[in-house]
Amino acid sequence: MADTVTTTALATTATHCPYCSLQCGMRLTAGATPEVQERADFPVNRGALCGKGRSAAVLLAPGARLTTPLVRERGELRATSWPLALDRVAAGLAAVRAEHGANAVGVFGGGGLTNEKVYQLGKFARVALGTASIDYNGRFCMSSAAAASRLAFGLDRGLPFPLADIAHTGCLILVGGNPAETMPPALRYFRELRENGGTLIVVDPRRTRTAEQADLHLQPLPGTDLALALGLLHVLIADGLVDADFIAARTQGYGDARAAAMAHWPERVERITGVPAAQLRQAARYFGRAASGMVLTARGPEQQSKGTDTVGAWINLCLAAGKAGRPYSGYGCLTGQGNGQGGREHGQKADQLPGYRSIEDPAARAHVAAVWGVDPGALPRAGRSAYELLDSLGRSGPGGVHALLVMGSNPVVSAPHAAHVAERLRALGLLVVSDVVLSETAQLADVVLPSTQWAEETGTLTNLEGRVILRQQATAPPPGVRSDLWILRELAERLGAATPDARPGRFDDDPQTVFAELRRASAGGQADYTGISYDRIRAEDGVFWPCPDAEHPGTPRLFLDAFATPDGRARFAAVSHRPAAEEPDAEYPLYLTTGRVLAQYQSGAQTRRVAELVGAAPGPFVALHPRLAARLGVVEGGPLAVVSRRGRALAPARITDAIRPDTVFMPFHWAGPGRANTLTNPALDPTSKMPEFKVCAVRLELPSGELGRGSGTGDLG
C-alpha cells in the first residue's frame, strides 16, 4: 500500500482518525486547508467516517490550537520561549524532588498518546525522575475490563478477535455501550450481524440509538449489571444450556460460579434490576441456543466500584455457554480512547512496564532495565492509581505530590469529583501541561507546552482489536510547536538523565527509533511487538499483537487453542451481586448515569472547538423521563440543577421516554456549570481502581435565573 499519493499539486497521506479506538483509516490532503478523505482500503471502517473524523482537520489551523509555550507570571499565562519554559519546568521538578523525594513528582498521561509517547513517558518517569507516581486517564476507561480479562483469560486485549467477526456471530449481548454514537462506523457490523440471521441484545438503562437497533433491549437500574449477568447464567443452568464439555476441558472454578448464579433466580433479579423475568429468560435462551455468541462490555458495567466483578460475571456467561476461545465467539471490551489499548501496554500505567509486564515482577524489571541501561534496583515500584494520584496532589506529609506533568489529558473535566480534583491541581507547587489546546486543565497550569497533534507527527497506536497501526505525518506543525518526544528528551537532558555519553536512543525524539526500542522492551512480554515494524504496518494495514518475530503472522484471534493462563484454562469468577457504593435515599432519590453524545469526544477539549460539532451538540443537558418531569414541574429546555453529595451541576432539561423514570442522564463533555463529573462518585473498584462514574445518587432542583450565568465552557472549580 502506498503511503503517499501525489496529485497535481498536493500530497495525500494515508493515516488514521485522531479520535476513538476504531482508529478509522482516512487520507489527508495537505495544503493551506488540509482535507480529510475516505480511505476504503482500511478494513476496520472500510471508508466510513463519523462527523468527528470528517472534521478532524479543523484543529490543524493555527488559530484553533496552542502555538507557543506559556508560563504563569503574576497570575496570568504569558508567552515565552522554549528554553525558558523548559528550564523552568526542569528546575521546578528538580527542586521538588530534592525537597520532598522522587515520588513527590507526578506524571499523568493519556489514552490518546501514541505508543512511542506512552513508552517514553513511562521511561521518563522511572529513569529521569525516579518516581513511582505515574498513571493515566485510561484508568477511567476500561481498567475493570482489563482486570477481569486478566483474571479470566490471563491476558487482556480489548477484542480478542477482529471487529469484523461481530457480523458472523449467532448472538451478541452488548452491555452498557452505545457505538451508534461513540464509534458510528462500527455499527455496520452490528447491522450485518442481524442481516446474517444473528440476534442483537442491548443492555442499557437508556433506549439509545444502538438499543433501537436491537432485537431485545434490557433496561436495568444503573449499577445492577452484575445481578443481571448472574440471572442470565441461572437461566442457562436451569434450562440445560451450559456446555459441560467445554467447561470440563477448558475452564476451572465453575462450581463457585454456579452456586452464585443459582442464588440469583429470575424473579429475584427482576426485583434488583427492574428487568422483567420473562425478558431475562428470553435473552438467556437466545444466547444459550445460538451456535456462536459474544458478550461485549463498555463503560456502563465497567465504570462501577464493582466493575471487575461485573465484567467477570459477563465472562462467566460466555464460558458457561462454551462461547469463548472458539470462532466468532468470546468476550470483548469496546475500548474508548484512540490508544486505549496501547496506552496501557507500555508503561504509563502505575503498575506496568512495557510489553504488559508487571513492574513488581523481578524478571520483568531486569529485562526492561537492561534495555534502558539502568540497574533494576533503581526502578521504582508500583505507584498509585489515577484518582489516588490526583487526590494526593498538593497534600503535605508523606505521599503528597507537589509537582505534576500532565501530557494529553484533561482531568478537570474527565475525573470524578472534578471540583475536588481542580482544587488539588491548584494546590500544586508546579503544574505543567503539554497539550494541543488550552484545555481546562492547562488553564490552571504554571507552564503550558504546545505539542504536535495527529497529522503533524508519525507514531503507532493500537486499536480496540489489538491491531497496531501507523498514523503518519501529513502536514508540518506550526512554527513554535514541538513533539512530546522532543519535550521529554529536552527535559531528560536538563535533569541529567540523557547526558552526551548516554547510549544512543536513550531519550530519542525520532518516533521510529523510539518504536524500535519499545519493540526490544516488549520482547517476551504478553504484548510482544518484536516482529512489528513501520514498514510491515504499512504493507499489511496493521499487525495484531502478539507478534514475537518478523516471520510471525500476528495474532488476530486469541485463545483458539488455549487461554493465556499457566494451565491454558480460563477461570470462572466467583462473584455475587452487591449494591453500588451510593444508592438513592430520601435526600437523593434518583440515579445519575453519565455518558457521551455523537458530536463530542471525551472531555471535549478538542471537539468543543469545532463549529460543526458544537452546532450539533452545543452544550450539556439533563435527560429525564416525562413522568419525572411532570412530577417536578420541569419543562423542556428549562434550567435544571442536579445535586449529589459532591456538588451541583446546572443544565437544560431534555425530556425523553428513552430513559427510566428513576434515572437521569448527563453527558460529560463539558466544563463549567454543566460539568457532569462535578457530581460523580470517586468510590474505587478494589481491583481495577476504577471510579464509579456510572451510578450515584442525586436529586433535582428547579433553580431560578441561574442558567444564564455560565456558557458551559468555563471551569467550575
Image: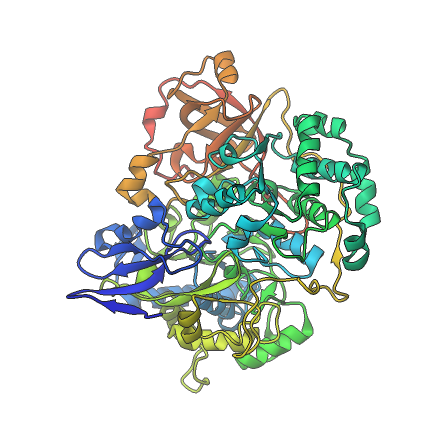
Q: Is residue 465 above or below residue 620?
A: below
Q: Quadrant of residue 285?
A: top right
**Could you tell me which quadrant the C terminus lies in?**
top left
Q: Is residue 593 visible?
A: yes
Q: What residue lies at 59% left-to-right and 49% top-to-bottom?
A: 169
Q: Nearer the viewer, residue 354 or 625?
A: 625
Expressed as whole percent of the image width and height from the top left, the position of residue 293 reads 64, 47
Expressed as whole percent of the image width and height from the top left, the position of residue 244 reads 81, 50
Does residue 73 appear to the left or right of 225 in the view shown?
Answer: left
Q: Is residue 614 above or below residue 79?
A: above
Number of numbered discs:
0
Does residue 364 appear to the left or right of 507 in the view shown?
Answer: right
Q: Nearer the viewer, residue 311 or 632?
A: 311
Q: What residue lies at 44% left-to-right and 16% top-to-bottom?
A: 634
Expressed as whole percent of the image width and height from the top left, the position of residue 206 reads 53, 30
Q: What residue lies at 64% left-to-right and 44% top-to-bottom?
A: 307
Does residue 488 appear to the left or right of 34 in the view shown?
Answer: right
**Could you tell me which quadrant the N terminus lies in?**
bottom left
Q: Quadrant of residue 373?
A: bottom right
Q: How are the colours assigned in the image?
A: rainbow
Expressed as whole percent of the image width and height from the top left, the position of residue 343 reads 50, 60
Q: Is residue 495 visible?
A: no
Q: Residue furthest bottom?
A: 501
